[in-house]
Image (cartoon, rainbow, N blue to C red):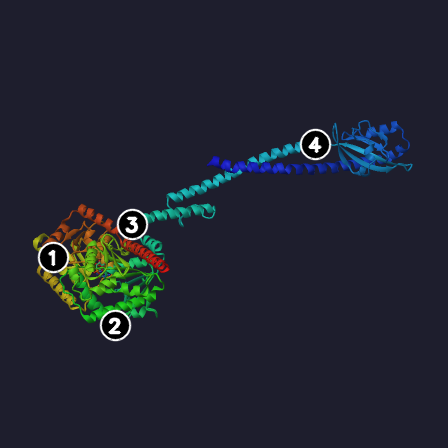
Amino acid sequence: MLRTLVWRFALPTLLVITGAAFFVMPHVESLLTGWFRADVDMRAQLVMSSMEEPLTELVDRPVAARIKRYLAKVTADERLLAVLVCRPDGQAIYQTEQTPPPVSCAMAAVDDFRQGKPVRTPRGTVYVSGFEAVAAGGQAFRTLIVHDLSFVDRRHGTVRDYLIAFAVLAAAALALLTVAVAWLLLHGWVGALIRDIRGKRFQDDAESPRAALPVLSQVRQVLREIEDSQRLEMDYRENWTPRALQHVVREHLGEPRMIVVSNREPYVHMRGEDGRPRVQVPASGMVTALEPVIRACSGVWVAHGSGTADKDVVDRHDRVRVPPADPAYTLRRVWLSEEEENGYYYGFANEGLWPLCHVAYVRPAFREEDWRQYAAVNGKFAQVVAQEAQSDSPVIFVQDYHFALLPRLVRDRIPGATIALFWHIPWPNEETFGVCPWKEELLRGMLLADILGFHTRYHCQNFLATVDRYVECQIDREHMTVTIHGHVCRVAAYPISIEWPPRWLEQLPGVDACRQDVCRRFGLPADIAIGIGVERWDFTKGIVERFQAFEKMLERHPRWRGKVSLLQVAAPTRGKLPVYQALRQETEAVAEGINRKWGTESWKPIVLIGEHQEPLEVFGLYRAADFCLVNSLHDGMNLVAKEFVSARDDEDGVLILSTFAGASRELIEALLVNPYDIGETAEAIRTALEMPRQERRDRMRLMRLTVKENNVYRWAGRMLMDAARVRQRQRLRTAAARGTSQARGAA
Ligand code: GDG
């Protein structure tokens, strides 16, 4: 670096100063000459003044010897070379002996003889000054005084030498100083920059001076960009984050207006006993997954306002900013009449489609009035979506089986919208789906989405088989697309997930403290083993089968009696429907029966918590548990399984998982069970209780890696990227078709 600095700084400095000296020199010389001449002029004037009187007398009586003597005295001064006394016509009256040729009295005969002038002589330059005077007898005469000027040449030489020496020394000193200062400064800045690079500090904690050298800010900016893109690349591969998702949305969809539509709202305002609204996060896998996504992307979430105090907190456009503690997006509430809710939600969606799609042996009910309400409510939501879109090309993310008709209804209103529909529950085979009287309308409604997502490939294949059977269209099984009336819909598997890390963990204490807290809350002995189940109280979740399996385990393995309790959170859901009421009664009866049969004064085998719990309480339970039982009879994915894994940063706890839950395709290190096989589930419980610590850790570690990598940001990012690609292809196709038809018209 030093050698570069010398070349870059010292050499130019030297050149500049030498050049400057070269140009300055002639000016200095002419200035000096001017001064010296003025000096000599003044001396000549003085000499003349002192000579004038004697000369006026001597000129009248020109006695050569006297003048000679007098002038010899005058010219004794070494600088005064000669004096010439002349007549005005140029004849010499007297001139001293040392008068150097070509100086002569002829020079006194010219008009401007008074004008002092330098004359080159063989002995060097002399300076001739002319004066006129009148002799005592009235005769005019002229005097030329010749001064030696060779000392001026000598002084010029000396000055030039000094000037050059000074210039060289000054240039060298300046160059050295510049190099030294630049080296010190750059050394400091580069050192700080290197420390920033090593410590990856390019933001506010950067050490390298921001303003000192503008180029440093640019270097930092570039490094920041490189770091960001590397981090994003890494994020995409192994750790999707909210930022990575935001990047995808920006890059692939161009800062769109993002609208999520679902039946369930992410925050419900319920009126408390004191009449004041209280916020509740509903028990819903869809909300668990989507809420972090919209929080990252911002936008609007359109949902049914179902809370008792929902209307109290919205503005005049039925909007409210959420999350309440740290608003990041807008919740637009849609109000439904009781009639609408009964027909669309309880009727068609939950008595028809929900049992239809889940193989849980509950017969679906399809009523014409319910279908009418379902279609009407879909139309109502489409209208609200169009109001909220505020653009020709919004991204609309439709959730679940409540809105199968929405893609078509929205497409009619906003043709340029990018629409993704995610189906959160399983899709049955074509025969099963065929029992729905309005299957064709549902399928046609769905197919106008750009992307149709399911949890597993198996559900996608079932869907394509159903479409193939009931709708006239082209299916490309290679690319998993369906083309209908020129519109292409891509059908693909996007296994849903949860945010990583879950935000609730931040507020929870360590695993031991959670365990103590749970034991205290539910009156359990401190050393008891804890099993946990968390779900909405739904017949697909296999809660009764779980209790039966737990009882079977106690029956088969008496050593565990009194040593393990199963805590079951069953959040009330769809309580208006008879099948859910019956399930509740059955569950309570089974739990009571088991507790009566096996329980003791100090031990309750099953603790049934039939009330909605706050998310923090749910995560506290996950952390306290020795094992978590997820034995759904049929489940699209099941996020409880993934939440349990995410809550166990201590790498402990065993997951028992149904093979009929989508999650079993990813969490293969869980103990997988057939939930209908009570004996197998009972054995899995025992295995979980007796599994060595190292095996628990190994299994949990792998599962945690899976959930971390396949988190909900990856799920949304992949789906939105695919939606953007499908949309771009669609635009290209439309433009090409328009071009062809114009060409035909012209021909
Ligand atoms: C559907 C599909 C799919 C439960 N009780 C409480 C409570 N929960 C939370 C859990 C979890 C969520 O509810 C349940 O998620 P699941 O995925 O298990 O089930 P569904 O609600 O049926 O979800 C399902 C999901 O959509 C996503 O696509 O996985 O297959 O059926 O987050 O923690 N939350 C609170 N209190 C409770 O009492 N706060």
Cβ of mark 2 under 8 A from ligand 1: no
Q: Position of residue 482 (x, y in %)?
A: 25, 57
How packed mark 1 is, by other alpha carbons closer than 10 Å (few <14, some 14-19, many 20 or more), is: some
Q: Residues within 10 Å of mark 4 (few under 14, many from 20)?
A: some
Q: Which residue is mark 3?
A: 239
Q: Is 318 above or below relative to 235?
A: below
Q: CA distance from mark 1 to mark 4?
A: 121 Å
> Of marks 4 and 3, which one's residue comes earlier in the chain?
4
Helix, strand or loop at mark 4: helix
Residue 105 at what x, y percent from top left? 83, 32
Answer with mark 1 or mark 4, whichever residue precedes in sequence.
4
Residue 634: image quadrant is: bottom left
Quadrant of picture, ligand 1: bottom left
Q: Label 4, on which residue?
A: 153
- The answer to which of 725 and 739 lies nearer the viewer is 739
Instruction: Tell me: 7 left or right of 506.
Output: right
For residue 225, above or below residue 393 = above
Tell me the residue at 30%/64% (across/down).
410
Structural crowding at the residue carrying mark 3, measured as other residues with C-alpha within 10 Å and reported as few (<14), some (14–19) or many (≥20): many
Determine contact: label 1, label 4, CB under 8 Å.
no
Going from N to C along the chain, the mark reached first, 2 or 3, is 3
Callout 1 touching callout 2 (CB < 8 Å): no
Give the side of residue 270 with respect to residue 562, left or right.
right
Q: Which mark is residue 676?
A: 1
Relative to the observer, which residue lies in front, 416 or 681? 416
How far is disc 2 from disc 4 in space, using C-alphas? 115 Å
